[in-house]
Image (cartoon, rainbow, N blue to C red):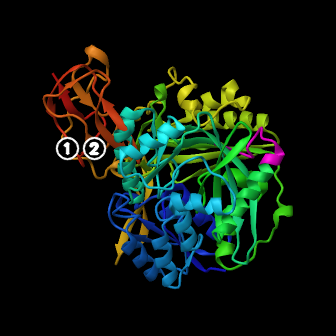
């Protein structure tokens, strides 16, 4: 068994892995950016090392800094979690070449499945059919036009070296091809470090069903039930459930067997997920995620298998303790991703900020995984996942009822969250009847009347409360902490955005707008779509803002002429900052 594991990640998944290490009696090592000095995963780990930097590229994607932390800590294993380096073959190879165990698949398997083109070919070799598409990388709009002539619109343009909906754009007609290619490449490069893209047919009303697989280094491979992840927005999952409901057991078995064939076909080891699209009684191979999934707790709830523990045991060279005949599925589980986003009107705008309050629900069959506590900051530089609510019950109807009860108990202040949208989904008759699809949230669900605005800050009392804080001391880059009780205002003090605050826009659309186009949240400008002197219409996108790893179009609030552009690509802006003026 491994003796010390460095967790090359942050937030909820880092906390999850650190707790699993403690359960197994394994020492844990955290790494952290400047913004995460006092994050929960850092506070829980046995040791912690500074990476420096604020952005992901400066910190959690800084290979040299992480390799240095591995060497200095003496860790004999590295768990990448999900995101960041979890599907990076070069990083996995750099780890293993140092004699350190990478808790994940072999680099060769990551390479096969990390490239979605070779992944399609690998599935075809074992007779698992995918969604109709091409194995050629897109280099021009002409290729997309030719594909659409054969298969029709819409067409999905996807990142060849990514997943989770990042870098994916849907082309509805010929006129939107060029913009979709550019946006997909830009987003793919920002999130995965590579901008290769490919295309495939975009199914109209599919369900997203995935199969959890687990394989050891001794040739054993099993599948652990299915998950339905069809409740999505922007191709990002909101609600997952296990097992996938309403599908013929024979199809479920065939899907599981296909997943095992795909895993064995690339000599897969450790935990992984094979994803399928299901429509009209047919399923199509989509991709394989060579890592632990965000939604893995739903599978744990219905199978009783601790997937992180199994990952560590498999990486330590152990055989799987169970075979396929031992796998049983009991009851039903629903997992809710609680994101810092305001779903009002279906916009799902990122909402970074300080968590003024966070009270998790409890009770039988209820689990809440998070990387934050009250007082922590949800930064614009990282993913917007606040936590995951997982509820188990004997059947699906009871699981839905229990989840609604738990969501009612969940209390979060300081940021807007997706909770109102989650409740709207769970209470909708389409969801109860399993008539939803991956397009359903955006095309059918009515979110016009819901709101999740951040709570206003609390009023200061005459006698200011004091809070305990671990004050960081770094000695040669290694973190040590001392406990101090400080005034709450001092605790909240920290780096502030020195960018001058600009006028607040009215936010109204149409001709009645002020002409001062403001951004609704803090983020980074990734594209300016207009120039001074251009004529624009109300509602026309004028700049693209990236916040919490999501691109958002900022639109003109009135028709007129662009008279001033106040930002450039790469600028960081705050919520309410005016970026452009329309005369």
Give the answer, above or below, for where 216 lies relative to 413.
below
The quarter holding residue 56 reads bottom left
Q: Which mark is residue 525?
A: 2
Q: Which residue is mark 1?
A: 568
In this orientation, does residue 460 appear? no
* Residue 286 position in % (x across, y down): 60, 51
Residue shown at the point (78%, 34%) measured from the top left = 397
Give the answer, above or below, for where 376 lies relative to 445.
below
Query: Image quadrant for the N terminus?
Result: bottom right
* Residue 376 position in % (x across, y down): 44, 50
Whether label 2 touches label 1, CB < 8 Å: yes
What is the count of numbered marks? 2
SS class, disc 2:
strand
Q: Nearer the viewer, residue 150 or 303?
A: 150
Q: Is residue 43 magenta?
A: no
Estimate the spatial distance between the alpha carbons at disc 2 and disc 1, rounded to whole Å.
Answer: 7 Å
Query: Image quadrant for the C terminus?
Result: top left
Give the answer, above or below, for where 358 lies relative to 290.
above
* Residue 289 position in % (x across, y down): 58, 58
Q: Residue furthest top?
A: 512
How many C-alpha atoms fall within 10 Å of the one at disc 1: few (<14), some, or many (≥20)?
A: some
Magenta stretch, residue numbers: 240-251
């Amino acid at each position: 068994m491994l003796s010390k594991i460095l967790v090359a990640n942050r937030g909820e998944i880092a906390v999850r892995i650190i707790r699993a290490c403690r359960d197994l009696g394994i020492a844990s090592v955290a790494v952290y950016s400047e913004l995460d000095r006092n994050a929960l995963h850092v506070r829980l780990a046995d040791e912690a090392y500074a990476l420096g930097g604020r952005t992901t590229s400066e910190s959690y994607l800084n290979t040299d800094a992480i390799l240095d932390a591995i060497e200095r800590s003496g860790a004999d294993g590295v768990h990448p979690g999900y995101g960041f380096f979890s599907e990076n073959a070069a990083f996995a190879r750099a780890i293993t070449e140092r004699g350190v165990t990478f808790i994940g698949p072999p680099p060769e398997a990551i390479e096969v499945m990390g490239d979605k083109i070779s992944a399609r070919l690998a599935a075809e070799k074992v007779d698992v059919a995918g969604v109709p598409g091409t194995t050629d990388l897109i280099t021009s709009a002409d290729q997309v036009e030719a594909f659409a002539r054969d298969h029709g619109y819409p067409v999905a343009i996807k990142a060849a070296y990514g997943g989770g909906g990042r870098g994916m754009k849907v082309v509805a007609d010929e006129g939107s091809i060029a913009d979709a290619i550019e946006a997909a490449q830009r987003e793919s490069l920002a999130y995965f470090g590579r901008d290769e893209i490919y295309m495939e047919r975009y199914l109209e009303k599919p369900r997203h069903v995935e199969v959890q697989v687990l394989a050891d280094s001794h040739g054993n491979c099993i599948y652990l039930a299915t998950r339905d992840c069809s409740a999505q927005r922007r191709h990002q999952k909101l609600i997952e459930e296990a097992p996938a409901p309403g599908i013929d057991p024979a199809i479920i078995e065939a899907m599981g067997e296909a997943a095992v064939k795909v895993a064995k076909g690339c000599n897969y080891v450790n935990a992984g997920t094979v994803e399928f699209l299901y429509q009209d009684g047919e399923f199509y191979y989509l991709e394989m995620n060579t890592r632990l999934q965000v939604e893995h707790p739903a599978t744990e709830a219905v199978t009783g298998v601790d997937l992180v523990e199994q990952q560590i045991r498999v990486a330590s060279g152990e055989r799987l303790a169970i075979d396929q005949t031992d796998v049983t599925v009991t009851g039903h589980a629903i997992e809710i991703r609680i994101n810092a986003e305001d779903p009002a009107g279906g916009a799902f705008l990122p909402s970074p900020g300080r968590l003024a309050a966070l009270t998790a629900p409890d009770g039988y069959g209820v689990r809440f995984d998070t990387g934050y506590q009250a007082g922590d900051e949800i930064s614009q530089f990282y993913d917007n996942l606040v936590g995951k609510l997982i509820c188990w019950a004997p059947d699906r109807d009871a699981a839905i009822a229990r989840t609604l009860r738990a969501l009612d108990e969940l209390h979060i202040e300081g940021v807007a969250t997706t909770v109102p949208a989650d409740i709207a989904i769970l209470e909708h008759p389409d969801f109860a009847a399993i008539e939803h699809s991956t397009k359903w949230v955006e095309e059918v669900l009515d979110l016009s009347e819901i709101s999740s605005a951040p709570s206003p800050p609390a009023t200061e009392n005459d006698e200011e409360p004091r809070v305990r804080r671990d004050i960081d001391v770094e000695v040669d880059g290694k973190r040590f902490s001392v406990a101090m009780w400080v005034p709450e205002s001092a605790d909240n003090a920290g780096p502030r955005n020195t960018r001058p605050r600009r006028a607040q826009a009215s936010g109204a659309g149409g001709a009645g707008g002020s002409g001062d186009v403001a951004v609704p949240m803090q983020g980074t400008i990734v594209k300016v779509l207009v120039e001074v002197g251009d004529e624009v219409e109300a509602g026309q996108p004028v700049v693209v803002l990236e916040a919490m790893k999501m691109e958002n179009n900022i639109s003109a609030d009135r028709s007129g002429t662009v008279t001033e552009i106040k930002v450039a690509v790469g600028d960081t802006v705050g919520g309410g900052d005016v970026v452009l003026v329309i005369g």
